[in-house]
Amino acid sequence: MLRSLYDRLLQIAAHPHALPWLAAVSFAESSVFPIPPDVLLIPMILARRDRTFIYATICLVASVLGGLLGYAIGHWGFEAVGRPVLTFYGYADAIGQFERAFAEYGWWIIVLKGATPIPYKLVTIASGAASFDLVEFTTASILSRGIRFYAVALLLWWFGPPIRRFVEERLGMVALVSTIVLVGGFVIVRYIF
């Protein structure tokens, strides 16, 4: 089953409609969607290494635009949308902590958390709820998401064929480690921050 899913993702990655899907997932992940764009980005790069940096740029632009939607949700629709999203991730009662942290370390919080597996939507919604400066938010988002997506892209571009062989030979282990990292991000958000 895992092999057929992997093969299907590679087929989707090579499909003409893959770019709009990559943009849509990157956009939605920054505001409400729980799945990171890496599920499309990585197979797309493995399928077409010549387009690596185009894919990373699409992720970056769509993610920052989605982050602006997350910011707007936090700023203007916190009770209606933002609080339910934060509740889903176990963070609903932490908005006061966010506001205090943003007052002191706001820019660095956005840069550091935007480049990690911690769900970025938490940062975007909290930034809006805390009324963090929009220009600083956008600048920090461009930097953090750029680091995140271009690091993945550069590694896959540089080590593409060996990484693809490694993934294909150890698909079960790669899927397990990816799941642990994803779940670990949620656990870190829930119990540590």
Image: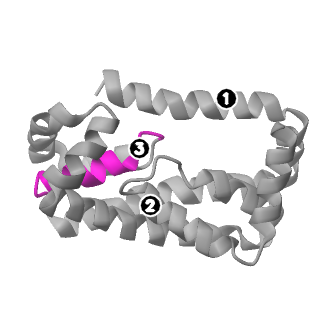
Q: Decide: is 3 above or below 129.
A: above
Mark 1 lies on a secondary structure that is: helix
Single out the mark in the foreground, 2 or 3.
2
Q: Position of residue 148 (x, y in %)?
A: 51, 53
Report how many numbered discs are placed on residues in the image.
Answer: 3
- Which residue type carries mark 3? Pro
Q: Is residue 7 left or right of residue 24?
A: right
Q: Residue at x 65, y 59 (%)?
A: 41
**Residue drawn at 70 percent across, 67 percent down:** 52
Tell me which numbered mark, 1 or 3, is placed earlier along the sequence: 3
User: Residue farthest to the top?
Assistant: 191
Q: Where's the C terminus, which quadrant?
A: top left
Mark toward the start of the polypeptide (2 vs 3): 2
Mark 2 in CB contact with mark 1 (< 8 angstroms): no
Residue for badge 2 = 28
User: Which amino acid type corresponds to the residue marked 2 in the rendered image?
Assistant: Ala
- Label 3 crowding class (10 Å Cα cut-off): few <14, some 14-19, many 20+? many
**Mark-to-mark CA distance, 2 and 3:** 12 Å
Which amino acid type corresponds to the residue marked 1 in the rendered image? Val
Bounds of the magenta span?
117-132
Residue beneath the point at 29% across and 59% down: 70
Q: Quote the CA–CA distance across marks 1 and 3.
A: 17 Å
Q: Compared with residue 100, is residue 130 higher up or lower down, i.e. above or below?
A: below
Residue 26, given in percent of the width and then of the height, sits at 50, 62
> What is the spatial separation of the Cα atoms under label 2 and label 1, in whole angstroms?
24 Å
The crowd level at tag 1 (other Cα within 10 Å; few <14, some 14-19, many 20+) is: few
Residue linked to disc 1 = 177
Q: In the image, which disc is placed on residue 119?
A: 3
